[in-house]
Image (tube, rainbow, N blue to C red):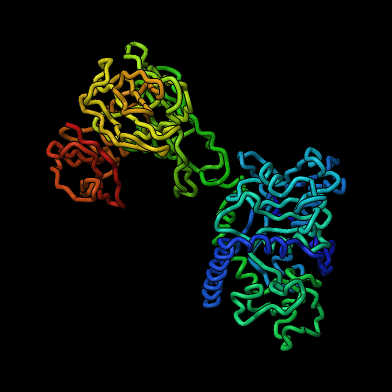
């Protein structure tokens, strides 16, 4: 990996990199961005927070070494590797080593910033990479002849927005460096974006390929911008005046040990803007000037550390430079979670268990069942048996590194087979002809953008599961206004929409989303049934069986499901609440001795149920005196506590 490449051998090759830089495009970029008042305000906040951080550091807060993973996108002209627009891997690695040496203060006379850059070893799909991404730029019109377009005509090649949108890697895990054979327009010398509180997909450094080497300091210069630094001559009006400096924390380059100067003032003996010459070499020999460059200052180090820790905080924690280590689920490594039910009653969960010391897994019934936690699950799969048919579940994994959990992954959901359908029941006709259509519908977590269906549409499924005793939400967005809406659900599955089954009745509405909450009756039939939404533009909806000219009806097949009352069979079933929902009692199997148990309603009010039995690995609690609803259980253990949810349903 790059961090292990020897640097000392490169120093003689690199020299000190004291060639003066040409003009980079940062100032032009800033002038454009600062036309936006929101950007100016955000950068003022950035500067004030940076100063507070620097003051804490000076009081002894200390600085940590920070490693920033990078990907180098080589946008070449269709030439082979080794051609001027397509440098070799070794040339790119050598250039980055020199950048690291300059940031470390070993190449030049500056301070050690504590910041280094490593080529990513994992790509966004979790596959091995060397951190160098080669892109054939000849596929873009005019790139071969004109390069990257940073302004209008005659710059007609691809812009940084196009290139980054097509090829940029996620900003949370990588800093993107784009090597382009040339840059047409006002940003032609190269440019980079300051860190932003709101990530922008075109963020990164754009550097002419021929300038990314050990002799040139441009790579170091642009990465300095990318890590939060201005030019040392910031505010000089293109050399017309000395930058203001009454408050060095909020004016000039916002760094107090780099005296203000005009961009052409590079004499080590004379500083027209600061005749004291205190710290003058910090400016006239600075990597962020246009002079002979060889150093970063202490103040610049602190500002860059602040920028990374607060505005690029995901980068030092992305782990993509060290794929042989234990990688938490937050790392951009594909854990390949999947779930399938190959046969009735059987579900198989799979994941990628590489780069993990151990795997914990948890699963639950949707929408809000209690989590079943399994610790130290062996291998890369788990088979669950005994799950009820047509029931939706979700599962997550947690990577354990050095005995410590690193957080659970996003969920993967699946539904067990043998779902009933709505084909066996005939319902009355309800339809329109045109206009007054239903644009979109959401039922719980299910969402459907149907658009205009010219009178009627049926969506088979079941598209979602509703549970007796639980409250669900329906939301409807009309496609025209004014419009009348109503919705029903056949809870008793009798093939008709009864008056008591009306779940949405907002009256006349405009073309905005309307929603309503409804509770599924406890005696609802556990089967597939139909939910109907009807609209009418001229009058109130006549009923569930209307036929109108200006209106529309949409039918959805939904399932009235049962919250699990049994435990599936699996290895090492720990921290399980059963039955759930519960009627008279609930058993909470935790897997270790329990000291005490508290029960809370969803408002946080503590209740006093009877504890019937405390065993060596769990507790049985009487819940018969509690009203129907959802409750929180909290157990005090010898070494901490545990919480679970339970639904009480009599």
The image quarter in which residue 305 lies: bottom right
**Left or right of residue 508, residue 382 in this image:** right
Residue 324 or residue 217, whichever sits in front = 217
**Left or right of residue 376, residue 489 in this image:** left
Camera sees residue 561? no
Tell me if residue 162 comes above or below residue 99 in the rendering. above
Q: Residue furthest front?
A: 538
Residue 221 or residue 535, whichever sits in front = 535
**Left or right of residue 125, residue 627 in this image:** left
Residue at 83% x, 69% y: name it.
20
Tell me if residue 313 comes above or below residue 304 in the rendering. above
The image quarter in which residue 118 lies: bottom right
Provide residue 68's location: percent of width, then percent of height.
63, 56
Provide residue 311's location: percent of width, then percent of height.
56, 59
Residue at 59% x, 49% y: name it.
173
Tell me if residue 64 comes above or below residue 391 in the rendering. below
Quadrant location of the C terminus?
Answer: top left
Residue at 45% x, 47% y: name it.
407
């Amino acid at each position: 990996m790059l961090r292990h490449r020897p640097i000392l051998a490169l120093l003689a090759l690199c020299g000190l990199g004291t060639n003066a830089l040409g003009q980079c495009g940062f100032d032009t970029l800033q002038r454009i961005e600062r036309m936006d008042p929101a950007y100016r305000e955000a950068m003022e906040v950035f500067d004030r927070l940076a100063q507070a951080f620097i003051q804490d550091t000076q009081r002894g807060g200390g600085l940590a070494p920070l490693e920033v993973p990078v990907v180098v996108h080589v946008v070449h002209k269709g030439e082979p590797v080794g051609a001027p627009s397509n440098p070799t891997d070794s040339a790119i690695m050598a250039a980055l080593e020199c950048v690291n040496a300059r940031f470390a203060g070993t190449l030049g006379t500056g301070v050690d910033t504590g910041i280094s850059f490593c080529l990513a070893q994992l790509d966004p799909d979790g596959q091995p990479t060397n951190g160098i991404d080669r892109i054939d730029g000849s596929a873009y019109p005019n790139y071969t002849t004109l390069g990257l377009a940073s302004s209008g005509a005659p710059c007609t090649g691809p812009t940084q927005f196009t290139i980054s949108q097509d090829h940029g890697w996620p900003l949370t895990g990588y800093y993107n460096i784009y090597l382009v054979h040339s840059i047409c327009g006002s940003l032609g010398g190269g440019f980079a974006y300051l860190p932003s509180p709101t990530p922008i997909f075109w963020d990164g450094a754009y550097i002419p390929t021929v300038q990314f080497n050990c002799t040139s300091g441009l790579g170091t210069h642009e990465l300095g911008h990318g890590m939060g630094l201005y030019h040392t001559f910031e505010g000089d009006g293109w050399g017309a005046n000395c930058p203001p400096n009454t408050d060095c924390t909020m004016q000039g380059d916002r760094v107090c040990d780099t005296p203000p100067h005009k961009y052409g003032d590079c004499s080590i003996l004379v500083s027209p803007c600061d005749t004291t010459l205190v710290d003058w070499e910090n400016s006239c020999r600075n990597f962020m000037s246009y002079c002979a460059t060889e150093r970063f200052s202490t103040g610049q180090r602190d500002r860059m550390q602040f920028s990374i820790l607060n505005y690029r905080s995901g980068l030092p924690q992305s782990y993509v430079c060290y794929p042989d280590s234990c990688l938490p689920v937050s790392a951009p490594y594909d854990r390949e979670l999947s779930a399938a039910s190959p046969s009735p009653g059987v579900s198989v969960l799979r994941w990628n268990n590489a780069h993990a010391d151990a795997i914990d897994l948890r699963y639950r019934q949707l929408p809000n069942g209690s989590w079943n936690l399994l610790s130290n699950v062996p291998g890369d799969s788990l088979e669950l048996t005994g799950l009820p048919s047509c029931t939706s579940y979700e599962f997550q994994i947690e990577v354990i590194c050095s005995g410590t959990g690193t957080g659970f992954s996003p969920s993967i959901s699946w539904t067990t087979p043998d779902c009933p359908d709505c084909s066996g029941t005939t319902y009355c006709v309800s339809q329109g002809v045109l206009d007054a259509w239903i644009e979109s519908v959401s039922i719980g977590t299910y969402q459907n953008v149907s658009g205009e269906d010219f009178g009627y549409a049926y969506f088979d499924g079941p598209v979602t599961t509703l549970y007796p005793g639980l409250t669900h939400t329906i939301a409807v967005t009309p496609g025209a206004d004014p419009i009348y809406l109503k919705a029903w659900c056949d809870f008793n599955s009798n093939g008709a929409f009864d008056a008591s089954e009306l779940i949405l009745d907002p009256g006349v509405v405009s073309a905005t989303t309307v929603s309503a909450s409804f509770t599924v009756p406890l005696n609802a039939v556990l089967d597939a049934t139909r939910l109907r939404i009807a609209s009418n533009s001229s009058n109130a909806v006549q009923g569930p069986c209307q036929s109108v000219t200006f209106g529309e009806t949409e039918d959805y097949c939904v399932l009235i499901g049962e919250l699990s009352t049994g435990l599936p069979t699996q290895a090492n079933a720990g921290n399980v609440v059963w039955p759930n929902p519960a009627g008279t009692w609930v058993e909470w199997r935790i897997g270790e001795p329990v000291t005490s148990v508290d029960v809370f309603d969803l408002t946080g009010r503590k209740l006093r149920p009877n504890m019937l039995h405390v065993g060596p690995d769990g507790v049985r609690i009487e819940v018969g005196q509690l009203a129907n609803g959802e409750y929180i259980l909290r157990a005090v253990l010898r070494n901490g506590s545990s919480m679970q949810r339970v639904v009480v349903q009599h």
